[in-house]
C-alpha cells in the first residue's frame, strides 16, 4: 500500500481513532452481535438473549484489542426497535466502545438511534446506514437528532464496478450523491462502506476503498464477511478449516487495499480475524517508514504483537 496524496481524514469517535494513511492507525475491527439467527438470542422481536454469553463475546473482543492494539466497534443488529434499544443499553453498559445501530429498516433504526442520543450515547452511536434508498423523512430525522457519525453504503445498483461507488457518493444524472445527503443530515463523520455483494465482488469493493480514499480521504472499509458467510461450498467441500481461513483472507485483502475498518461478521470470529489483521497492520506500518509515515498511537500492532 502506498501513501495517498490526498490528505486523509481521521475521526475521533468517543476516543477511538479511525482513518489516516496506511501505517498511522490500526485497522478498526467490527464484529456483529444479536444478528438474525444468532444463537444467543431467544426472542429477536422482544430482545431476549443470553446476557452472560453476550458479555463474554464482547469481553473477548476487548481482550484481543488489549493484545493487538486493534480497536473495535460493536455492530449491534436488531429486528425490532424494542429489541435494538435493549441491545444498545446492554452493550453500552458492558463496554465503552462505539457501536453501530444496525437494522434492515430505517423504521427500526431511527427509534433506536433516537433512544441512544436521548440517554447520552450520541457520541458512541453510529447510524448504519444511509444508502441510495434514503428518504427525506430519514434525512430530517437524523438532522434533528444532531447525530455526527453514520455509515454511507456506497452500493450503486446501476454500476457495480468500483467507479460506481464513486458515482453513488458524488451523484450523477441529477441524482443527489450520498455525501450531499449526509451533509444535509448533519453527518460530519461519514464512514464509507464499499458494499460487498458476493465473493467475486470483494475485489471490486477493495479496489473502491483505495479509490475513495485517494479522491476524498474519508475513512473507508467494507464487510467481506457477508460474502464468505453465504459461500456454501467453502464449508461443504473444503473442510472445517476453509471457512475461517477464507474469512481471514478476505479481511487481509481489504486491509492491504487501505481499509480503515473491516466488518468481519459474527463477533465469535474475533479470534480468527484479530491476529491476521494485526499482523498486516504491523507489516504495513513497518514498510510505511520508507514513506515517512509513523504510527500515531503508542499501542499500534507494530509495537504490540512481536
Image: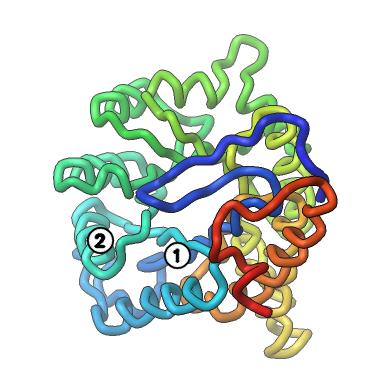
Give SS at disc 1. Answer: strand
At horizontal 59% and vertical 52% (from top left) the residue drawn is: 296
| Place of residue 90 in the rendered image (x, y in percent of width and height, measured from the top left) | 22, 66
Reading the image, the residue beneath label 2 is 92
Q: Is residue 106 above or below residue 65?
A: above
Q: Is residue 106 above or below residue 221?
A: above
Residue 44: which quarter of the image? bottom left
Q: Mark 1, residues whose alpha carbon is within 10 Å: few (<14), some, or many (≥20)?
A: many
Q: Is residue 99 above or below residue 150?
A: below
The numbered disc on residue 32 is: 1
At horizontal 37% and vertical 74% (from top left) the residue drawn is: 58
Image position of 48 (left or right of 124): left
The front one of 237 and 220 is 220
Q: Residue furthest bottom?
A: 240
| Place of residue 214 in the rendered image (x, y in percent of width and height, measured from the top left) | 74, 33
Tell how many labels.
2
| Place of residue 84 in the rendered image (x, y in percent of width and height, measured from the top left) | 26, 56
The front one of 19 and 255 is 19
Give SS at disc 2. Answer: helix
Asked whether residue 172 appears in the rendered view, the answer is yes
At horizontal 76% and vertical 51% (from top left) the residue drawn is: 257
Q: Is residue 89 above or below residue 14?
A: below
Amino acid at each position: 500500500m502506498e501513501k495517498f496524496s490526498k490528505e486523509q481524514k481521521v475521526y475521533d469517535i468517543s476516543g477511538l481513532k479511525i482513518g489516516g494513511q496506511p501505517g498511522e492507525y490500526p485497522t478498526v475491527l467490527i464484529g456483529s452481535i444479536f444478528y438474525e439467527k444468532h444463537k444467543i438470542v431467544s426472542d429477536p422481536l422482544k430482545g431476549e438473549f443470553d446476557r452472560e454469553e453476550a458479555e463474554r463475546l464482547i469481553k473477548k473482543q476487548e481482550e484481543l484489542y488489549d493484545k493487538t492494539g486493534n480497536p473495535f466497534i460493536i455492530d449491534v443488529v436488531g429486528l425490532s426497535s424494542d429489541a435494538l434499544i435493549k441491545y444498545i443499553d446492554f452493550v453500552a453498559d458492558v463496554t465503552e466502545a462505539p457501536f453501530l445501530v444496525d437494522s434492515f429498516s430505517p423504521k427500526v433504526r431511527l427509534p433506536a438511534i433516537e433512544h441512544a442520543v436521548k440517554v447520552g450515547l450520541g457520541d458512541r452511536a453510529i447510524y448504519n446506514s444511509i444508502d441510495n434508498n434514503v428518504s427525506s423523512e430519514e434525512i430530517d430525522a437524523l438532522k434533528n437528532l444532531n447525530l455526527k457519525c453514520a455509515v454511507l453504503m456506497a452500493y450503486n445498483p446501476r454500476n457495480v464496478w468500483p467507479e460506481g461507488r464513486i458515482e453513488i457518493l458524488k451523484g450523477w444524472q441529477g441524482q443527489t450523491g450520498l455525501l450531499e445527503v449526509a451533509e444535509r443530515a448533519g453527518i460530519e463523520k461519514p464512514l464509507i462502506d464499499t458494499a460487498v455483494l458476493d465473493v467475486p465482488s470483494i475485489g471490486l469493493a477493495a479496489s473502491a476503498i483505495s479509490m475513495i480514499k485517494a479522491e476524498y480521504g474519508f475513512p473507508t472499509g467494507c464487510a467481506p464477511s457477508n460474502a464468505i458467510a453465504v459461500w456454501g461450498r467453502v464449508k461443504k467441500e473444503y473442510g472445517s478449516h476453509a471457512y475461517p481461513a477464507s474469512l481471514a483472507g478476505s479481511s487481509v485483502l481489504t486491509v492491504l487495499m487501505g481499509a480503515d475498518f473491516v466488518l468481519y461478521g459474527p463477533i465469535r470470529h474475533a479470534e480468527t480475524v484479530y491476529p491476521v489483521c494485526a499482523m498486516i497492520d504491523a507489516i504495513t506500518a513497518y514498510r510505511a517508514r520508507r514513506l515517512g509515515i509513523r504510527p500515531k498511537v503508542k499501542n499500534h500492532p507494530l509495537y504490540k504483537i512481536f
